[in-house]
């Protein structure tokens, strides 16, 4: 049956039989694969990779080759799926498909047994090398990491195929750039102009009558001079005195 690519949730892995661990598993898996291909079906089951993790719902899709393998694809839950419009699914022409197949052919690994092409775990190699250096008193040797891709070698082997595949792809539509509206600079606040100190306030200062005024009167005066209006009455009076003294001394 058809398994929609729009509902796949993760990368696909491959499952192969291992006769060295389970005798007869390779023949049984191969016969199962042929039967599933003939019936045009795939299997659904649970996969548990570690005892401490939860199982995953997966699809086992028979791989049509001579190795008897299955592709394992994690399936989504109902809440994870969404309707995909036909216009959102791209279709490649024959030229692009042929170019992609030529590129893929350059990345095929040829081996008798899948395990023979697997690299060693670099972290384990480093760990065992460290134990050996400590126990034997030797310098720690640098570990060769076989899992790192030789990008330069890959490009040399498949540069022609990469270029042909790139040329076969359709050109992307140029996105329309929306002009950003420039933010208008904030309107500058008008410059504060102090109120003129009247003769009445100067007389109150000279006659030592500022302490007889109410807080509201003192605050109104200080606000007109651009001074702070917080504090007790004694603070307000002292502030008014300083302002008037400054005005008189400047004059």
Image: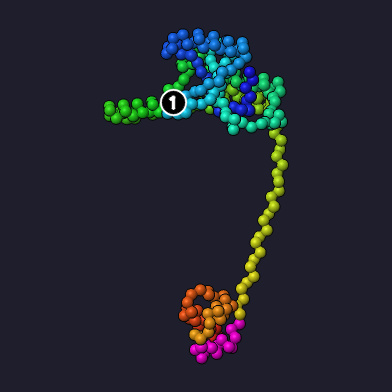
Q: Residue furthest left?
A: 136
Residue lying at 67% horizontally and 31% vertically, measured from the top left:
84
Relative height, residue 214 to residue 178 (above, below): below
Can residue 178 be seen in this snapshot? yes
Residue 161 picture location, percent across and down: 63, 22
Q: Residues within 10 Å of mark 1 (few under 14, many from 20)?
A: few
Q: Is residue 199 above or below residue 21?
A: below
Q: Which residue is rendered at x = 54% and y = 11% of the image?
A: 32
State which region is magenta.
196-209
Location of the C terminus by quadrant is bottom right
The reply, left or right, for residue 199 in relation to residue 84 is left
Where is residue 2? Give x, y as percent: 64, 20
| Nearer to the camera, 107 or 222 | 222
Say which quarter of the image contains residue 120.
top left
Q: 243 or 37, which is in the foreground?
A: 37
Label 1, on which residue? 50
Q: Nearer the viewer, residue 31 or 157?
A: 31
The residue drawn where x is 66% and y is 31% is 83
Please check the rendered image and state whether residue 15 is part of the magenta-colored stretch, yes or no.
Answer: no
């Amino acid at each position: 049956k058809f398994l929609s690519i729009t509902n796949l949730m993760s990368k696909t892995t491959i499952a192969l039989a291992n006769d060295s661990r389970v005798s007869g598993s390779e023949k049984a898996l191969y016969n199962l694969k042929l039967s599933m291909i003939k019936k045009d079906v795939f299997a659904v089951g649970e996969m548990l990779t570690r005892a401490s993790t939860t199982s995953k719902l997966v699809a086992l899709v028979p791989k049509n080759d001579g190795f008897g393998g299955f592709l394992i694809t994690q399936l989504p839950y109902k809440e994870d799926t969404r309707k995909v419009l036909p216009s959102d699914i791209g279709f490649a022409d024959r030229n692009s498909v042929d170019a992609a197949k030529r590129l893929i052919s350059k990345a095929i690994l040829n081996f008798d047994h899948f395990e023979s092409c697997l690299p060693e775990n670099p972290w384990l190699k480093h760990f065992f090398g460290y134990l050996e250096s400590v126990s034997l008193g030797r310098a720690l040797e640098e570990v060769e990491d076989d899992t790192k891709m030789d990008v330069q070698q890959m490009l040399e082997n498949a540069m022609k195929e990469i270029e042909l595949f790139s040329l076969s792809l359709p050109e992307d539509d140029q996105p329309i750039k929306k002009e950003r509206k420039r933010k208008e600079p904030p309107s500058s606040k008008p410059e504060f102009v102090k109120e003129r100190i009247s003769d009445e306030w100067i007389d109150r200062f000279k006659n030592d009558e500022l302490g007889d005024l109410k807080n509201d009167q003192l605050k109104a005066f200080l606000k007109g001079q651009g001074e702070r209006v917080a504090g007790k009455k004694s603070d307000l009076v002292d502030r008014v005195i300083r302002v008037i003294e400054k005005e008189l001394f400047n004059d």
